[in-house]
Amino acid sequence: MQGKSIFIVGASSGIGRALAEMLQTQGATLFTAGRTQPEGIQSTHMNWDVTQPVGDSLSQLPEVLHGLVYCPGTINLKPFQRLDREAYQADLDVNVLGAVAAIHAAYPALKKSKAGSIVLFSTVAVKLGMGLHSSVAVSKAAVEGLTKSLAAEFAPYLIRVNAVAPSLTDTPLAQNLLAGDKRDAANKRHPLSRIGSPQDIAAMASYLLSDQAAWITGQVIGVDGGMGNLR
């Protein structure tokens, strides 16, 4: 990553923070955006709530960018009858429309790199179909559609677009799902007998940003402990 400029939205915790730490040790120059500045990360930080218009919030992006990773997400698990239109809209705002806004802002600089990489995040629940997941699955399925559409549209400019689809990962966002005995039960549901760590997911994102993944685009890659394909 030496000499590469990478823009991470949502680097203050969870997968985004693990990725920022990883890229920092690899020599990348980091630009971050979110409501909270990531502590201990050397970056040019821009305050932006992803549910709000960009305006001039991302004006400190560099002229040339080699990568964009959009990390914000939601885990809004409720029975369908308890999910109203506003709940679906809230998930779409964070998971999809925030990503669209970030890509719009970063696109000119990514295009100038002539070797750009965009990494988005889906979920194993899109592939499997899981109860209580309808709202998040709808929005993350849209992320997968966005990934493939933009991969096709941006390919002539040598900008690659891929998505990572994790299973349950040990992040602050997932703590309510891991309290007490829930953690042991979650571990046992995965063929590899454990839930994911932020570093597991960040490692794939880092790979997709790198030159080693130069011939990979339009893919949704499961990093899910085998959950998506094994019984």
Image (spheres, grey):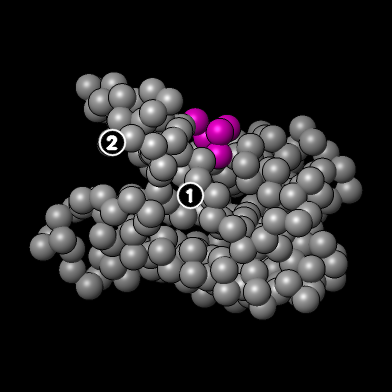
Residue 122: image location, x then y, percent: 46, 55
Q: Residue furthest right?
A: 3
Please indicate whether residue 6 sits to the left or right of residue 75 in the image.
right
Instruction: Judge by depth and name the residue closer to the eye, 8 or 220.
Output: 220
Given residues 213 and 83, the one toward you in this image is 213
Residue linked to disc 1 = 165
- The answer to whether residue 51 shows anywhere in this view is no
Tell me: 166 left or right of 179.
right
Q: Quadrant of the N terminus?
A: top right
What residue range appears in magenta?
Answer: 197-201
Percent position (x, y) of residue 212? Answer: 79, 46
Assess whether residue 200 is covered by the magenta stretch.
Answer: yes
Q: Secondary structure at mark 1?
A: strand
Q: In the rendered image, which quarter is residue 170 located in?
A: top left
Q: Nearer the viewer, residue 132 or 103?
A: 132
Q: Please determine whether, in this image, residue 47 is positioned above or below residue 150.
A: above
**x 77%, y 62%: residue:** 116
Query: Mark 2 or mark 1, which has the lower sequence index?
Result: 1
Q: Residue at x 34, y 59 (%)?
A: 137
Marker count (numbered)? 2
Whole-percent x and y of residue 136?
33, 58
| Circle nearer the viewer, 2 or 1 | 1
Is the magenta region chiefly helix, strand or loop? helix
- Under mark 1, the amino acid is Ala
- Please identify the quarter of the rendering in which residue 181 is found: top left
Q: Does residue 1 lie above or below 59 as drawn?
A: above
What whole-number distance in Å separates the C-alpha atoms at marks 2 and 1?
A: 18 Å
**What is the three-letter code of the residue carrying label 2?**
Leu
Judging by the rendered image, the residue that carries numbered circle 2 is 177
